[in-house]
């Protein structure tokens, strides 16, 4: 047994050295621009406002973002909104994160948020319209500030906004 170990030693070391060199050579290759996700089924839609289904939401959360999000402990934290205030029971003001951009490089602005929330509320096939049932109106205050006015106080608003993706204004009525 000892004799066999001595004979295998140099070959074993050479094999590990070749494997390590091959791994290092691969480190210099550019990373592919394609993102791959392994899932057991495809999303029901690529339109983030149409399917309120966990697999679809999970996949599309890699592409779209809402005003808020939930951290690992399910606490509401900023996403596209860097901060918000609630000056009275019926008013919420959201200040957008400066420099947030869409995939085409255009900056996310208040009008995109207004357009997205109105799309959620008005799209005939939206699975998320009920998330905004207490919202009376949405308006841009300036380029990076949005105000939501409610019909009555709604404690769950910040949680619901975490599931409502912001799309570029002018997005088609349905994303295929």
Image (cartoon, helix red, strand yellow):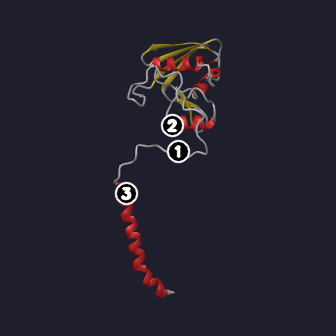
**Dot 1: element:** loop
Q: How crowded is mark 3: few (under 14 residues within 10 Å), some or many (20 or more)?
A: few
> Tag on residue 26?
3
User: What residue is rendered at 64% in x and 17% in y?
Assistant: 133
Please provide percent x and percent y for residue 108. 43, 24
User: What residue is rendered at 59% in x and 27% in y?
Assistant: 50
Please provide percent x and percent y for residue 104. 39, 29
Is 34 on the left or on the right of 93, as rendered? left
User: Residue 74 falls in which quadrant of the image?
Assistant: top right
User: Residue 73 falls in which quadrant of the image?
Assistant: top right
Please provide percent x and percent y for residue 60. 54, 34
What residue sits right under mark 2 in the picture? 62
User: What residue is rendered at 41% in x and 70% in y?
Assistant: 16
How far separated are the C-alphas under marks 1 and 3?
22 Å
Question: Mark 3 and mark 2 in contact (Cβ < 8 Å)?
Answer: no
Q: How crowded is mark 1: few (under 14 residues within 10 Å), some or many (20 or more)?
A: few
Is 34 on the left or on the right of 149, as rendered? left
User: How many marks overall?
Assistant: 3
- Image height of 173 relative to 63, above or below: above
**Dot 3: element:** helix
> Tag on residue 37?
1
> Tag on residue 100?
none
Question: Mark 1 and mark 2 in contact (Cβ < 8 Å)?
Answer: yes
Label 2 vs 3, first from the N-terminus: 3
């Amino acid at each position: 047994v000892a004799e066999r170990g001595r004979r295998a030693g140099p070959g074993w070391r050479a094999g590990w050295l070749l494997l390590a060199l091959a791994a290092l050579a691969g480190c210099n290759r550019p990373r592919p621009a394609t993102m791959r996700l392994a899932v057991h089924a495809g999303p029901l839609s690529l339109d983030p406002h149409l399917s309120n289904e966990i697999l679809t939401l999970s996949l599309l959360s890699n592409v779209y973002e809402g005003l808020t999000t939930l951290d690992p402990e399910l606490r509401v934290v900023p996403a596209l909104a860097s901060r918000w205030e609630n000056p009275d029971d019926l008013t919420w003001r959201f200040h957008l994160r400066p420099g947030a951009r869409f995939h085409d490089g255009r900056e996310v602005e208040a009008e995109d948020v207004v357009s997205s929330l109105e799309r959620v509320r008005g799209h005939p096939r939206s699975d998320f319209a009920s998330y905004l049932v207490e919202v009376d109106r949405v308006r841009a205050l300036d380029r990076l500030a949005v105000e939501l006015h409610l019909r009555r106080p709604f404690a769950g608003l910040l949680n619901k906004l975490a599931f409502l993706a912001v799309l570029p204004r002018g997005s088609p009525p349905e994303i295929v």
